[in-house]
């Protein structure tokens, strides 16, 4: 769930500020009772939170409605015997809400559930070292994460807009350790309610992409300033997907995704965060991919292709240093391992890999690469289906109007007929301009690929001319061939993702016009 604009916190929810790490301290608007734990027994759960109510109709729109999308993913995954997330409360909540999840969001692929499971793992690891720390979940919606990771001692602060908090409290009531603030994530009032002495972990899943880039920068800098030594996990979408949402991308024929102004490619994340604040200590990428099916299969096929991973969604784990300049380590995978400058030498041919950080297993990066390729292909297929479905409705309706006009010209819908040609000209002209811009980008990309190949071929030729024996020549040729195959595969994946993005961008104005007509003309 997300917070697109600043909304002031309701004052009655902020009458007491947590002052310490112990559960007996006061909390926001909730009376407290010290938690007693018998020796040798597990700490008790807080009072029952999930109280389903049949037929609850959520009064949500825009970004706030995305909390139902995430709920749908988690509940669908939780009910599977091979699910990656154990979340029975999400099933309980979904069953109590009167909402057509499948019509709006389609069949879930499990990606959002996998995201939640990965954040669960990061939180459990952090809580091992900060058992009484506080987790702040921004734009949390109907997420039940606090119950999945609860160690009986931690504290949790859920921050969301007033409408979202009202719906949340129908199912997940606040307690002395689990508190709610009805405010925007951009409102610093929630920071005043956090005592950082026992450690702070901020979660922002499904949030930042809905904010303007400058708002994201301000929020990140504010967290780093107020909570030195804290940790932050957030997810981000690539630039091409952000552009599609701004053009009116639809998840299904019945649901248009909210605009996502902040898109950032994976290779831009770390330099951007370091530019935003000098206390960034480490930046790690957690595993973020569909758990099964074709997305997983295609990712497996590109196990040795890392280049396309920069154009897929990513899950980022940031550690903030306690002081500027402290522990400025570069990390780019959740399984942190270094791959310093290495040389692969023969007596006559030397290649040098630039210093970088990578995971112990390149499997995840490759999964990301092909996952992005399949995600783009799936999105294009879904958009094409939307266009076909909406076009059928529009044609049927206009044929009906035409037949009615034939029998009774005086009652013809002239306004509808007069808009047919202009709207088509506008939609296809816009699509043509987009394709023109995209073709220029494609030319520049192909020129870069060609230039890289020329330089590589030149280096290989020089190396082969210096070979003094057939064995040395064969070794050089083998090294060159392996490198060429890897580059060719990487380029193919990268260009495939670009092509799907270009197609989606060009089809967006046509899809928008057709779907708008279908909605306007009615069933």
Image (spheres, helix red, strand yellow):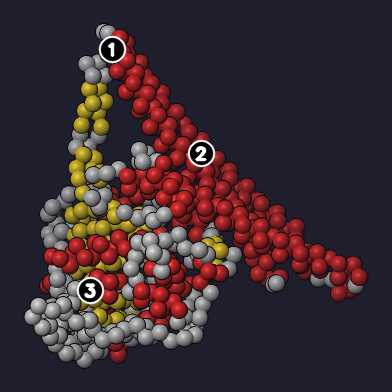
Question: Could you tell me which secondary element the residue under label 2 belongs to?
Answer: helix
The tag on residue 442 is 2
Vertical arrangement, residue 474 with respect to residue 110, above or below = above
Vertical arrangement, residue 473 with respect to residue 210, above or below = above
Vertical arrangement, residue 456 with respect to residue 407, above or below = above
Q: Nearer the viewer, mark 2 or mark 3?
A: 3
Tell me the residue at 55%/44% (across/down).
437
- Residue most toward the right? 407
Question: Could you tell me which secondary element the residue under label 1 belongs to?
Answer: helix
Q: Could you say where residue 222 lies in the image, as x and y percent from the top left?
A: 25, 67
Considering depth in this image, is 96 or 373 the residue closer to the camera?
A: 96
Q: Is residue 119 visible?
A: yes
Return the residue at label 3: 150
Tell me the crowding category of disc 3: few under 14, some 14 to 19, or many 20 or more residues within 10 angstroms, Cα based. some
Tell me the residue at 61%/57% (across/down).
385
Return the residue at label 1: 471
Considering depth in this image, is 100 or 332 the residue closer to the camera?
A: 100
- Residue most toward the left? 39
- Side (left or right) of 133 relative to 454: left
């Amino acid at each position: 769930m997300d917070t697109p604009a600043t909304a002031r916190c309701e004052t009655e929810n902020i009458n007491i500020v947590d002052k310490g790490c112990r559960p007996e301290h006061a909390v926001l608007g909730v009376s407290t009772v010290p938690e007693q734990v018998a020796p040798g027994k597990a700490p008790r759960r807080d009072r029952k939170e999930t109280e389903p109510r049949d037929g609850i109709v959520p009064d949500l729109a825009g970004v706030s409605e995305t909390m139902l999308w995430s709920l749908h993913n988690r509940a669908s995954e939780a009910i599977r015997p091979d699910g990656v997330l154990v979340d029975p409360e999400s099933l309980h909540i979904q069953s109590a809400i009167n909402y057509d999840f499948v019509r709006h969001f389609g069949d879930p692929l499990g990606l959002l559930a996998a995201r939640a499971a990965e954040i669960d793992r990061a939180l459990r690891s952090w809580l091992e070292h900060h058992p009484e720390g506080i987790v702040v979940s921004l734009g949390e919606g109907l997420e039940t994460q606090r119950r999945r990771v609860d160690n009986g001692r931690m504290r949790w602060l859920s921050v969301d807009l007033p409408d979202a908090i009202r719906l949340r409290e129908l199912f997940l009531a606040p307690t002395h350790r689990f508190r709610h603030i009805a405010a925007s994530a951009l409102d610093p009032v929630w920071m005043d309610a956090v005592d950082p002495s026992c450690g702070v972990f901020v979660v922002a899943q499904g949030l930042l992409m809905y904010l303007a880039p400058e708002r994201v920068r301000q929020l990140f800098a504010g967290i780093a300033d107020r909570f030195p030594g804290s940790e932050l996990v957030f997810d981000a979408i690539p630039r091409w997907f952000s552009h599609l949402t701004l053009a009116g991308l639809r998840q299904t024929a019945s649901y248009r995704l909210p605009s996502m102004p902040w898109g950032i490619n994976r290779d831009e994340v770390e330099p951007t965060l370091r530019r935003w604040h000098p206390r960034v200590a480490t930046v790690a990428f957690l595993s973020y991919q569909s758990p099964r099916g074709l997305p997983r299969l295609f990712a497996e096929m590109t196990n040795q292709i890392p280049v396309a991973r920069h154009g897929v969604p990513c899950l980022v784990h940031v550690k903030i240093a306690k002081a500027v300049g402290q522990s400025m380590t570069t990390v780019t995978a959740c399984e942190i391992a270094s791959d310093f400058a290495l040389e692969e030498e023969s007596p006559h041919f030397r290649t040098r890999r630039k210093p970088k950080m990578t995971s112990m297993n390149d499997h995840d990066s490759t999964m990301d690469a092909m996952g992005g390729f399949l995600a783009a292909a799936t999105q294009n297929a879904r958009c094409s289906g939307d266009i076909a479905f909406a076009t059928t409705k529009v044609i049927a309706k206009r044929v009906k109007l035409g037949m009615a006009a034939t029998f009774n010209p005086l009652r013809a819908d002239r306004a509808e007929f007069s808009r047919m040609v202009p709207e088509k000209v506008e939609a296809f002209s816009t699509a043509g301009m987009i394709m023109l811009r995209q073709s220029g980008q494609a030319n520049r990309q192909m020129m870069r690929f060609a230039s890289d190949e020329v330089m590589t071929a030149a280096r290989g030729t020089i190396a082969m001319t210096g070979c003094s024996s057939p064995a040395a020549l064969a070794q050089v040729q083998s090294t060159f061939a392996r490198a060429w195959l890897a580059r060719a595969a990487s380029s193919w994946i990268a260009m495939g993702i670009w092509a799907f993005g270009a197609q989606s961008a060009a089809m967006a104005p046509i899809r928008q016009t057709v779907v708008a007509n279908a909605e306007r003309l009615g069933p």
